[in-house]
Amino acid sequence: MGIFKKIFGRQSKEIIQNTTQIKKTDGSFGDTILRFQNSIQKSIEWDDLKNVEFAMWLPCNEDKTFASSPITEKWTTVYSLTKDYWSYITADLLKTLELTDEKTFRLGLPDNFEAFAFLTNDNEQIILSLSKEKGIRLHFAETTPFKYKAAFLDNFISYCIAWKELIEFNNGPKDENLGFEEWWLFTLKTSIAVEEQEPLTGVGKIVI
């Protein structure tokens, strides 16, 4: 885990001072957030990753085209939620991975791309990437079953909704719009246009 703490240490200046503490909680918010947190087993070192492709979307027998994939709609939902609450979600994800202090409540996205690998409770490997340009992304291994990817994204969407509702319930401030939703919508549009001419091999790939 040391390598990830070292990487994230360079972004310590990004910590946002929290002036609005969460004063009230609701069982449904907490239960949903906890359910997603509990789906993550631990962070892992980059060298422990499988020698396979990781991406936001990869074609497979059950999900052959990007344009018709249910994954694309799920990512559009993720971006619509995280654009206003990215600092809360970023801090909580990195706390769940034990990569930042437990007292951190809001955390800025890094100027440059940063990536952190983790293992789910079902021993599936996923990469979390963070950047101001592209936001909060999850990259799944090509060996991970399609149904698992879809279910994990659904769980992540519920988690993001819970954070949105929790902040709104406590009249917490929204985050600055960094424009990464526009990056996704542009990527979505251009990827579909490319796919009309030739098959896509993946979207949002990370080279291991």
Image (spheres, grey):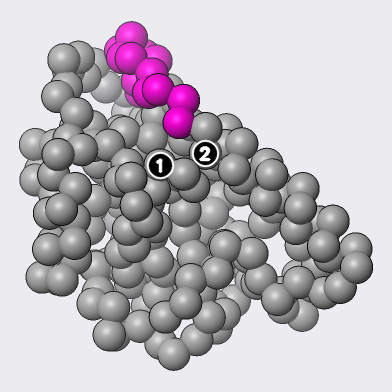
Residues at discs 1 and 2 in contact (Cβ within 8 Å) = yes
Say what amino acid the circle numbered 1 marks.
Lys
Q: Residues within 10 Å of mark 2 (few under 14, many from 20)?
A: some
Q: Is residue 159 visible?
A: no
Task: Using the numbered discs, state the Cα–Cα distance from disc 1 to disc 2 in whole angstroms.
Answer: 7 Å
Depth check: 102 or 137 in front?
A: 137
Q: Does the magenta-highlighted stretch encompass residue 170?
A: yes
Q: Nearer the viewer, residue 17 or 26?
A: 17
The quarter of the displayed image where residue 66 is located: bottom right
Label ID, residue 180: 2
Q: Residue furthest top?
A: 171
At label 1, counting other C-alpha atoms closer than 10 Å, the crowd grade (few under 14, some 14-19, many 20 or more) is some
Q: Secondary structure at mark 2?
A: helix
Three-letter amino acid code at the position of disc 2: Phe
Q: Which residue is mark 1?
A: 132
What is the span of residues highlighted in magenta in the rendered image? 166-178
Whether residue 11 is situated above or below residue 129 in the rendered picture: above
* Image quadrant occupied by the N terminus: bottom left
Of the numbered discs 1 and 2, the one sitting upstream in the chain is: 1
Question: Residue sitting at 9 percent across and 36 percent down?
Answer: 103
Identify the residue at the far bottom of this view.
Answer: 51
In this orientation, does residue 80 appear?
yes
Instruction: Kindly state the secondary structure of the residue where label 1 is placed.
Output: loop
94 on left or right of 123: left
Left or right of 184, for residue 109: left
Magenta segment includes 46: no
